[in-house]
Image (spheres, rainbow, N blue to C red):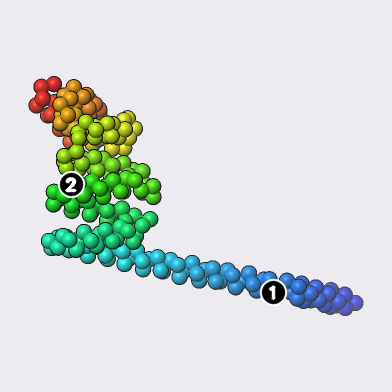
Amino acid sequence: MADIFNEIDEELRKDKAQEWWGRYGKFVIGACVVVVAAAGGYTWFEQQRTAELRELADRYSHALTQADAGETDPALAALQSLSQEADGEGIAMIASFQRAGILADQDRHAEAAEVYAAVAADDGVDPLYRGLAELKAILHRSVAGEDTAALLTEIEPLTLDGEPWRYSARMVAASLAMGAGDMEKAKAYLTQVSDDDGAPNSARTQAVEILQAIGS
């Protein structure tokens, strides 16, 4: 008798399962298809992204090879194109920094400053590197002959405590102050560096040497 009840119970379970599958089976199948498609799409996306990044890296490497070979203009053009087409990628910023460096090496400081300024103004770039770009832009604008007093005002925020590039900014600010004839301000910036135990040793040593040279 128990076997009969077991058979009846099993048949009921089968009927309920078939009823459930008939009602919801298509949704289960659809969900499985979506999951498989999503996994496949993600894999394809990652493969495409890897290929794109590799292609960008190859272009950057080729531009550096051109620069080393003295093919400056093609290298600059390639780096500019790379920085524009790779917008949003870290390599775009690196290409811009490299391009500005090549321009500076050619004494084209005003052009180098423009490239650095563009990086500094890009909200997509990490604030750390935006600050460095701004500092470099001011430095090269100074070398290009811009008014040092005006640049001294612009650089001041970068010299404040807590700013990541404050030591370099203070050294540049000291140089600008000397160029503007404000020796007291120059000494103040140099002293900030020389008396700061947290400053890099090279910066502290240089600050002390300059202070001695200008008769602090």
Q: Could you tell me residue 17's position as x and y percent?
A: 77, 74
Crowd rating for badge 2 (residues with CA inside 10 Å; few <14, some 14–19, many 20+): many
Secondary structure beneath label 1:
helix
Report if residue 198 is visible in the image: no
Looking at this view, is 53 or 106 the one in front? 106
The image shows a total of numbered marks equal to 2
Instruction: Tell me, yes or no, if residue 41 can be seen here.
Output: yes
Q: Residue at x 34, y 32 (%)?
A: 162
Residue type marked 1: Lys
Mark 2: which amino acid?
His
Q: Nearer the viewer, residue 38 or 133?
A: 133
Query: Which of the 4 image quadrants contains residue 66?
Result: bottom left
Q: Nearer the viewer, residue 143 or 6?
A: 143
**Residue 32 in the figure: left or right of residue 185:** right
Q: Which residue is mark 2?
A: 109
Indicate the quadrant where residue 32 lies: bottom right
Distance from the alpha carbon under mark 1 to that under mark 2: 67 Å
Image quarter where the N terminus lies is bottom right
Q: Position of residue 153 (x, y in %)?
A: 27, 31
Dividing the picture into quadrants, the one containing residue 84 is bottom left
Q: Residue furthest right?
A: 1
Q: Earlier in the sequence, mark 1 or mark 2?
A: 1
> Whole-percent x and y of residue 206?
15, 32
**Residue beneath the point at 19% across and 33% down:** 148
Q: Quadrant of the C terminus?
A: top left
Residue at position x 50%, y 69% from top? 41
What numbered label is drawn on residue 26? 1
Q: Residues within 10 Å of mark 1 (few under 14, many from 20)?
A: few
Q: Secondary structure under badge 2?
A: helix
Front: mark 1 or 2: 2
Relative to 84, does residue 213 appear above or below in the rendering? above
